[in-house]
Image (spheres, rainbow, N blue to C red):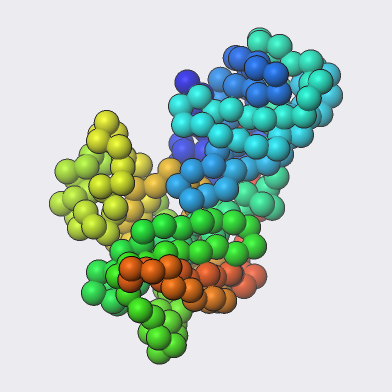
Amino acid sequence: MTEKLYLESIDAAYSYQFDATVLEVDNNNIILDRTLFYPIGGGQHWDTGTFSGPNGPLTVTEVRGRNRIIHTIEENHQLSSGDEIRGTIDWQTRYKHMRMHTAQHLVSGIAYELFDGVRTVGNQIHADKSRIDFNPISFDETMLNQLVDAVNIHIDSGLEISDSIMTRDEINNIMPPDRTNMNLLPASVKNLRVVEIGDRVDMCPCAGTHVANTSELGHVNLIGKKSKGKGTQRVTYNLTESKHTRIPNQNVL
């Protein structure tokens, strides 16, 4: 089991350096006792960065896993179980993912409210652009403009983002299960990390990384719409630069 430092709080995602111990080595796949590196999942791409260990810096190219987080690094690394390393996240990419993922929650939540409970059935979060799949819906230009305007108004209002641990029953008593996609979560998961934007503007189980305030997002700009069949439409978006960007935490975890 790898301790996921980025899940300790919303603020923890702003940290970019940590110290850890190597638990397992399998060729160029490394498992640590703790990590800030986000593994691919929930539509969000993995973090990249470096390890600094007893034999110098090493590039982390891929991160996967759920309980045991596997960091893929360059070959001939000479790391062994028990070695101490310092991990450093590529902060610029991490922060872009944080902004994009928070924007996805906001767009999905507002679309649900505006368009008769339309569901988010898929998403992919990347640094430069991201996409959301909605069902059932057929967006026209007026609807998309309405959605973007509503999202950007909420962004400008500076809503705080928070997280908490809730049971399935607790969140189901607040938000409709179809909004939170509860059926997509493994039944074995009883306690959920729930990310909330403002006062329930959006509230959704999520293990991704997020910003602390919507003012950090910039504005959402829709750059594409595509039919995916059976009432599903894919909307692609990017973000403008924000005047309220936040620097990372300087402390080493």
- Quadrant of residue 146 within the rendered picture: bottom left
- Quadrant of residue 165 within the rendered picture: top left
The percent position of residue 114, horizontal first and vertical second, equals 29, 77
Q: Is 137 placed left or right of 155 in the picture?
A: left
The percent position of residue 190, horizontal first and vertical second, equals 25, 34
Q: Nearer the viewer, residue 89 or 140?
A: 140
Q: Is 57 placed left or right of 21 in the picture?
A: right
- Quadrant of residue 145 within the rendered picture: bottom left
Q: Residue at x 45, y 64 (%)?
A: 132
- Figure label count: 0
Image quadrant containing the C terminus: top right
The reply to whether residue 10 is visible in this rendering is: no
Figure check: 43 above or below 220:
above
Figure check: 149 above or below 40:
below
Figure check: 226 above or below 13:
below
Q: Is 113 placed left or right of 32 in the picture?
A: left
Farthest right residue in view: 56
Q: Residue at x 30, y 37 (%)?
A: 186
Figure check: 194 above or below 28:
below
Q: Nearer the viewer, residue 191 or 65?
A: 65
The percent position of residue 219, horizontal first and vertical second, equals 55, 74
Farthest front residue in view: 229
The percent position of residue 164, horizontal first and vertical second, equals 34, 43
The reply to whether residue 128 is visible in this rendering is: yes
Q: Residue at x 22, y 42 (%)?
A: 168
Q: Residue at x 43, y 82 (%)?
A: 144
